[in-house]
Image (cartoon, rainbow, N blue to C red):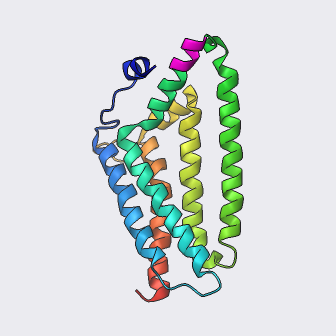
Amino acid sequence: MLDCVFARWQPTIGDPTWQGWATVLVYLAAAALAFRAGRASFPPATRARERAFWGLTLLLLLALAVNKQLDLQSAVTAAGRCLALAQGWYGQRRLLQLGFLIVLALLAAVFLAVLLRMLRGSWPRSALPALGIVFVCTFVLMRAVGFHHIDRLLGLTMGLPVLSLRANTALEWSGPALISLGAVRIFRLSGR
């Protein structure tokens, strides 16, 4: 099984372009701001929940920074493909893929419900970074779906001809940017 996986996936840099490395830095900068925001002074009624939110946000951003270049989801995909080939159900993989996407969508809905409950009473401070989390999760789901027309859309370039910013990069940076803005707002509200 490992031979099959490593024949299809190599532990190399997933996106060696300037945009790939810039995305890693965007995730790491947002993670640093999330760390600082989690140490801010919050009202006693919501303190524990808001700190937990910022801690989870920090972990998510760090995981995405690491995954951006290691491309671990491709290793999982390769393992699934190898398993399907070895067990002889590769021809029926579409049904499993659909089930996987349904489970991902349900997990996203549960995550959103938990997020809404976690942040109750703190929406003036938490709405912007929560929207950033929604953007991040939506982007991850879009990439997980991987339909060809979505992949073509994400590959388009936009902006200045010199930079040739891909739509994929602009969308991926949106979530961490909103989270970062929310963290900076927390600093300003808490006087730090």
Name the residue rendered at 66%, 49% in the picture.
Answer: 108
Residue that appears at 65% across and 71% down:
119
Residue 28 horizontal/vertical position (percent): 36, 58
| Segment tinted magenta in the rendering | 82-87
Magenta residues: mostly which secondary structure? helix
Residue nearest the viewer, comparing 76 with 108: 76
Percent across and percent down for residue 167 are 46, 42
Q: In the shown orientation, is residue 176 left or right of residue 46? A: left
Q: Residue at point 42% right, 22% down?
A: 2
Please give the name of the residue rendered at 59% of the width and 42% of the height, measured from the top-left corner.
141
Image-quadrant location for residue 192: bottom left
Relative vertical location of residue 137 with respect to residue 156 in this rendering, above or below = below
- Can residue 178 be seen in the rendering of this structure? no
Position of residue 118 measured from the top left corner of the image (x, y, whole percent): 66, 69
Residue 159 among magenta residues:
no
Residue 75 versus residue 107 in the image, above or below: above
**Number of callouts in the render?**
0
Seen as rendered, the residue at the extreme front is 1
The percent position of residue 24, horizontal first and vertical second, equals: 35, 51
